[in-house]
Amino acid sequence: MKGMARNIAVVMTDDLDGSPAAGTVMFGVNGVTYEIDLSEQNRARMERELAPYVAAGRRVSRSQRRASAGRPPGPRADRAVVRAWAKDNGLKISERGRISAEVISQYEAAH
């Protein structure tokens, strides 16, 4: 008996409503890139709703995204001061190692 041929079909479904998807859309918000599979109708709706923001926004190249990733430039808080502030305010923090972004954000918001 000869080998049997196989056909494998990939069926994409719209991530919003489960209908057949026409393709994948990639978009970014707050420095995070997302992908979503959408039907033609939902893709058109997304593009219509984003159109005013796209028109008013500035396009950013890949090299600009990499350069702006991470912590913004500026003075960095003294870690010892941040640790003391966190302890005084009842936040759980280790004596050594990295200080979480959440603790640093709270410290910066308080000062």
Image (cartoon, grey):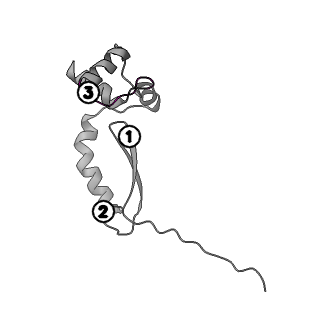
Quarter where residue 18 is shown: bottom left
Task: Tell me the quadrant of the picture where the C terminus can be found.
Answer: top left
Q: In the figure, is residue 4 to the left or right of 102? A: right
Question: Is label 3 in contact with label 2 (beta carbons under 8 Å)?
Answer: no
Which numbered disc flags the more N-terminal residue, 3 or 2? 2
Magenta span covers which residues? 89-98
Q: Amino acid at mark 2?
A: Gln
How far is mark 3 from mark 2, CA to CA? Answer: 42 Å
Vertical comparison of 37 with 104: above or below: below
Q: Which residue is mark 2?
A: 41
How far is mark 2 from mark 1, CA to CA? Answer: 24 Å
Instruction: Give the class, few, some or many, for how many residues have Cα within 10 Å of label 3's Cα (few <14, many ≥20).
Output: some
Q: Dot 1 lies on which element?
A: strand
Q: Which residue is mark 3?
A: 106
Is residue 96 a member of the stretch shown in magenta? Answer: yes
| Residue furthest bottom as drawn | 1
Instruction: Give the class, few, some or many, for how many residues have Cα within 10 Å of label 1's Cα (few <14, many ≥20).
Output: few
Dominant secondary structure of the magenta stretch?
A: loop
On the image, the x and y values in percent for residue 74 come to 34, 15
Q: Is residue 23 visible?
A: yes
Which residue is more in the foreground, 110 or 70?
110
Q: Amino acid at mark 3?
A: Gln
Which label lies toward us, 2 or 1?
1
Q: Which residue is mark 1?
A: 32
Which residue is more in the foreground, 4 or 90?
90
Q: Dot 3 lies on which element?
A: helix
